[in-house]
Image (cartoon, rainbow, N blue to C red):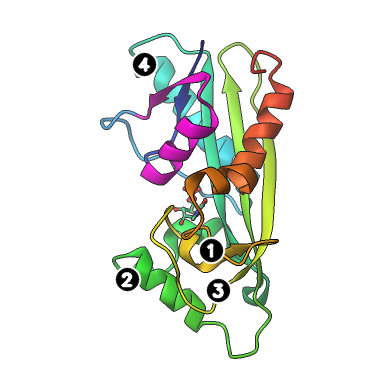
């Protein structure tokens, strides 16, 4: 089975990758490893920066052989907010302690009657141990709910309604999110690239 270091400590992402890539052994980013910088202006830059940073750290400190590194840079892009919070999604409203509060803050930024169109974007960077890094990306279109709904998922899931649904990602069962999410679509694109994954 392919063994891949997952360059993330985000528990929500880890849970989703375990479900989306059941045929890959995922090695978690060690607790003693440093935070990986993400200073780029685009999802793709940040995903590559994390994958290459993690691969370099693993070459010096890794405790087992791996086939490569996988990094995810993702976020919620709201048209009425000029695409924000976008690449800054993980750093939006750092003064607020929980996503419950951050979700409310985000919704409060939209004036009544504003366009609520939004999309989740996910770029995966893959740094194989034997070759150059590459990226795949995907998105899911949708709209912002009027208020947070549902306890499932993580992050902005309670305020995002994917196209074709009336329920937020927070209300949909995990299985349903995994059929249409940005991360699920990016994993499907990764499978197309990596012949070793069927
Ligand atoms: P980053 O990729 O580490 O910069 O963080 C991405 C941030 O975007 C996460 O911390 C979440 O706030 C948000 N995000 C990305 N994907 C999802 C998702 O599937 N559901 C909810 N929030 C997400």
Residue under label 4: 62
Q: Is residue 57 visible?
A: yes
**Residue picked out by circle 2:** 95
Sequence-wise, which precedes: disc 1 or disc 2?
A: 2
- Residue nearest the observer in this picture, 2 or 126: 2
The residue sitting at 68% across, 41% down in the picture is 137
| Dots 1, 2 in contact, CB < 8 A | no
- Between tags 3 and 2, which lies in front? 3
The quarter holding residue 135 reads top right
Mark drawn on residue 168: 1
CA gap between label 1 and label 2 equals 25 Å
Kindly check if marks 2 and 4 are in contact, taking CB atoms under 8 A apart as contact.
no
Q: Is residue 10 visible?
A: no
Describe the element under mark 3 as helix, strand or loop: loop
Q: Could you classify mark 4 by the number of other residues whose Cα lies within 10 Å: few (under 14), some (14-19), or many (20 or more)?
A: some
Q: Position of residue 1 (x, y in %)?
A: 51, 10
Where 20 falls versus 24 (above or below)? below
User: Residue at the location (41% across, 55% down)?
Assistant: 152
State which mark lies toward you, 1 or 2: 1
Quadrant that contains the C terminus: top right
Tell me which numbered mark, 3 or 2, is placed earlier along the sequence: 2
């Amino acid at each position: 089975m392919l063994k891949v270091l997952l360059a993330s400590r985000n528990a929500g992402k880890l849970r989703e990758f375990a479900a989306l890539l059941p045929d890959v052994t995922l090695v978690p980013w060690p607790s003693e490893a440093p935070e990986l910088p993400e200073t780029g202006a685009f999802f793709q830059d940040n995903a590559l920066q994390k994958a290459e940073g993690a691969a370099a750290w693993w070459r010096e400190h890794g405790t087992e052989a791996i086939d490569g590194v996988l990094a995810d840079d993702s976020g919620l892009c709201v048209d009425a907010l000029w695409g924000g919070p976008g690449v800054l999604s993980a750093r939006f409203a750092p003064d607020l302690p929980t996503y419950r509060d951050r979700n409310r803050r985000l919704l409060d930024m939209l004036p009544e009657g504003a366009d609520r169109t939004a999309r989740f974007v996910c770029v995966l960077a893959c740094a194989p141990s034997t070759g150059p890094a590459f990226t795949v990306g995907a998105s899911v279109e949708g709209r912002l709910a009027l208020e947070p709904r549902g306890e499932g998922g993580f992050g902005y899931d309670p305020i995002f309604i994917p196209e074709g649904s009336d329920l937020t990602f927070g209300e949909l069962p995990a299985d349903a999110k995994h059929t249409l999410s940005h991360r699920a679509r990016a994993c499907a694109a990764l499978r197309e690239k990596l012949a070793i994954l069927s």
